[in-house]
Image: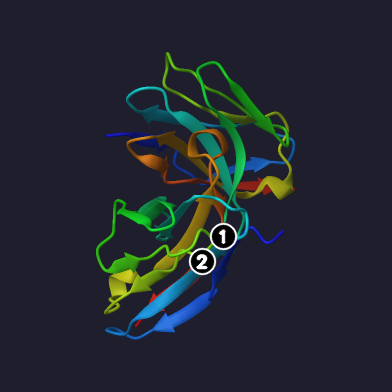
Amino acid sequence: GDSVTQMEGPVTLSEEAFLTINCTYTATGYPSLFWYVQYPGEGLQLLLKATKADDKGSNKGFEATYRKETTSFHLEKGSVQVSDSAVYFCALYSSASKIIFGSGTRLSIRP
Amino acid sequence: NAGVTQTPKFHILKIGQSMTLQCTQDMNHNYMYWYRQDPGMGLKLIYYSVGAGITDKGEVPNGYNVSRSTTEDFPLRLELAAPSQTSVYFCASSYSERDYGYTFGSGTRLTVV
């Protein structure tokens, strides 16, 4: 069945460092791909999305490119801030599975 | 613009008791979902609905029931609560799953003792 695998955390970085959180997927057909962010005590918020191969999703300085050849959707940000500390979830949608989520990566940014 | 509203935010339930978690959305979304999130884990789909009067099981439906009598409301019923149902429950809705993803509520933290 469909699945999402993302790098385990926690990830700790200094402010202004470059961020990469890896995400790979297994799916039949052409899924849509998402990144969600969860701040402490809150629900998940959609961060960015891509609905077809080679699409780049972007929001708040974060980017991810839908790579069908490597079945990946890695999240990147050029310069992280303390306010980016949260848990990040990679997810995919397929008509067979609805939206399924990775296990989440906790990110902590040091001032 | 309220979005997806869940009540209660916190609840402690005794083993064997029953309760209903409420979820309502004001965005006129046809698709609605219930997920549970266990500590350090991703989200598991419990039930979903593609419109009023239509519900279907997700990955982990045992011990739960749902109904969808209106577009706005999608309550989750726990019958005979068990400690394994201790979790954070999230309700979500969507206009178009493929194109827009989900809008989530802020969650209900449930403890069964």
In front here: A27 or B49? B49
Q: Residue at x 55, y 65 (%)?
A: B24
- Disc 1 element: loop
Q: Which residue is nearer to you in this view: A24 or B97?
A: B97
Screen quadrant of the C terminus of chain B: bottom left
- When the figure is inspected, residue B12 is found, relative to residue B98, above or below; the finding is below
Q: Position of residue A45 (x, y in %)?
A: 60, 49
Residue identifier under label 2: B23
Residue A43 is left or right of residue A79, and the answer is left
Q: Is residue A69 above or below residue B89?
A: above
Q: Residues within 10 Å of mark 2 (few under 14, many from 20)?
A: many
The residues bearing labels 1 and 2 have C-alpha atoms spaced at a distance of 8 Å
Q: How is the image coloured?
A: rainbow
Q: Is residue A18 visible?
A: no
* Image position of A32 (left or right of B80): right
Q: Which mark is residue B54?
A: none
Q: Chain of mark 2?
A: B
The picture places residue A69, in percent across and down from the top left corner, at 42, 13
Between circles 1 and 2, the one closer to the viewer is: 2
| Residue at image coords 53%, 76% | B8
- Give the residue type that dot 1 points to: Gly
Earlier-in-chain disc, 1 versus 2: 2
Quarter of the image where the N terminus of chain B is located: bottom right
Q: Are marks 1 and 2 in contact (CB under 8 Å)?
A: yes
Observer-nearest of B77 and A108: B77
Chain under callout 1: B
Instruction: Name the residue: 51% across, 58% down.
Output: B71
Reading the image, the residue beneath label 1 is: B105
Q: Amino acid at mark 2?
A: Cys
Q: Do the dots labelled 1 and 2 sit on one chain?
A: yes
- In percent of width and height, residue A98 lies at 39, 41
- Dividing the picture into quadrants, the one containing residue A41 is bottom right
